[in-house]
Amino acid sequence: MFFSICVAIGFLITIPAYAGNIPVYQYVGVGIYFVCAILLASIYSYNLNVVRRIQYIKENQLEIMSVTDSLTNIYNRQMFDRTFEKWIQAADSNGSSFSIIMFDLDNFKMLNDSLGHLTGDRVLIDCVEIVRSNLREGDIFARWGGEEFMVLLPRSDLRQASDVAERLRAAIEVYFNAKNIQITASFGATQFRQGDTTDSIIMRVDDNLYSAKEAGKNTVCAG
């Protein structure tokens, strides 16, 4: 716009010197033409930018929706699987390590049946906020399905994963006890080992979660 205005002003200033005496109405007409052309170009450019912004926002929202759980606004299972696979590949290639925590809410179906699904949804949302507030910025947190969740802890060993799981377990218990809701969580934890695949790690952490359930629930089993 600035360039166009400068060209128009320069043209209107210099044209009398080269075109001789021209009628005032023609001179004014040329000026109006320049003004209209610049305004129309500016409106078109503005509308085009608005359309592009709206398109970008919609595409961004669709991308976020494709990787986010609609209820809790954390990663969904598909996004976790993709991220999980990348961490396994990186650990295989550079020898780095990470740990996985799998947990679910104890007796959640009974809560849904007795208090309703809206209360169950609220419990899931509150649980996610509790866990998220107790994780590091780089930790990866996802809803695995139903009341099951996954946490990937980069650059963490089994002891650190066990400590994190115990901290999360205690925070969930304290929070819901204060609300007089009988909700606790059971945790399984394991560490990446060279040669692991997604299936072998998931099987191991799932077995540990099952052991935590068998041990009486509201506990952590790491190994």
Image: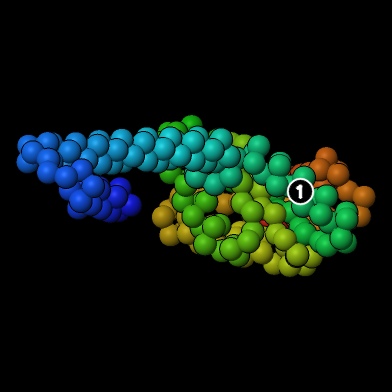
| Three-letter residue code for mark 1 | Lys
Residue 86 image position (x, y, % from top left)? 76, 48
Residue 159 image position (x, y, % from top left)? 77, 67
The one of 80 and 53 positioned closer to us in this rendering: 53
* Outermost residue, front side: 20
The one of 198 and 188 positioned closer to us in this rendering: 198
Residue 15 image position (x, y, % from top left)? 21, 47
| Residue at 43% in and 53% down | 180
In the picture of the structure, the residue carrying the numbered disc 1 is 86
Whether residue 222 is situated above or below residue 34 in the rendered picture:
below
| Residue at 49% in and 55% down | 129
Q: Is residue 191 visible?
A: yes
Q: Quadrant of the C terminus?
A: bottom right
Whether residue 191 is situated above or below residue 44 in the rendered picture:
below
Q: Is residue 220 left or right of residue 38?
A: right
Q: Is residue 219 left or right of residue 127?
A: right
Q: Is residue 71 visible?
A: no
Q: How many marks?
A: 1
| Residue at 77% in and 52% down | 87
Q: Is residue 223 left or right of residue 57?
A: right
Q: Is residue 104 left or right of residue 41?
A: right
The residue carrying pointer 1 sits among few (fewer than 14), some (14 to 19) or many (20 or more) residues within 10 Å by Cα, namely few
Residue 66 image position (x, y, % from top left)? 56, 35
Whether residue 30 is situated above or below residue 221 in the rendered picture:
above
Q: Secondary structure at mark 1?
A: helix
